[in-house]
Amino acid sequence: MKADKKASKNTFSVIFVIQKGKCRPDGKAPIVARITVNGEMVHFSTKMYIEPERWLPLEYKTKGQTHEIGRASCRERV
């Protein structure tokens, strides 16, 4: 007996992005996590903010060595 159905492939990814369009008055943009499961995407707040010029969009992470950025980078590794 052969199975007519192809085995479905499950996918899962988590990336961090900033929302430049929602900057606070101090110029910092919120960092949000984007979770994608089988093509369905959900965003949620990390409750962290960063200056947009300190964000590496192609690498989905921060650059620099400030205390706040170090804290954000530590949370990315969890």
Image (tube, grey):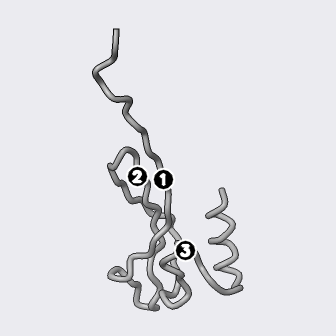
34 or 44: nearer the viewer: 34
Contact (Cβ within 8 Å) of mark 2 with mark 1: yes
First in sequence: mark 3 vs mark 1 = 1
Side of 49 where 22 appears, left or right: left
Q: Is residue 15 above or below residue 5?
A: below
Q: Position of residue 13 (x, y in %)?
A: 48, 53
Side of 72 where 48 appears, left or right: left
Q: Secondary structure at mark 3?
A: loop
Q: Position of residue 48 (x, y in %)?
A: 53, 72
Q: Which residue matches tag 3?
A: 59
First in sequence: mark 2 vs mark 1 = 1
Task: Name which quarter of the figure residue 6 lies in.
Answer: top left
Outermost residue to the top: 1
Side of 1 where 73 appears, left or right: right
Count all numbered tags in the image, as a single digit. 3
First in sequence: mark 3 vs mark 2 = 2
Q: Is residue 5 above or below residue 36?
A: above
User: Mark 2 to mark 1: distance in Å?
Assistant: 5 Å
Q: Residue at x 57, y 74 (%)?
A: 61
Q: Which residue matches tag 2?
A: 36
Q: Position of residue 38 (x, y in %)?
A: 37, 44
Q: Which residue matches tag 1?
A: 13
Tell me the crowding category of disc 2: few under 14, some 14 to 19, or many 20 or more residues within 10 angstroms, Cα based: some
Q: Amino acid at mark 3?
A: Glu
Q: Secondary structure at mark 2?
A: strand
Outermost residue to the front: 2
Tell me the crowding category of disc 1: few under 14, some 14 to 19, or many 20 or more residues within 10 angstroms, Cα based: few
Q: Amino acid at mark 2?
A: Thr
Task: Name which quarter of the figure residue 45 lies in.
Answer: bottom left
Q: Position of residue 57 (x, y in %)?
A: 48, 78
Q: Quadrant of the N terminus?
A: top left
Q: Amino acid at mark 1?
A: Ser
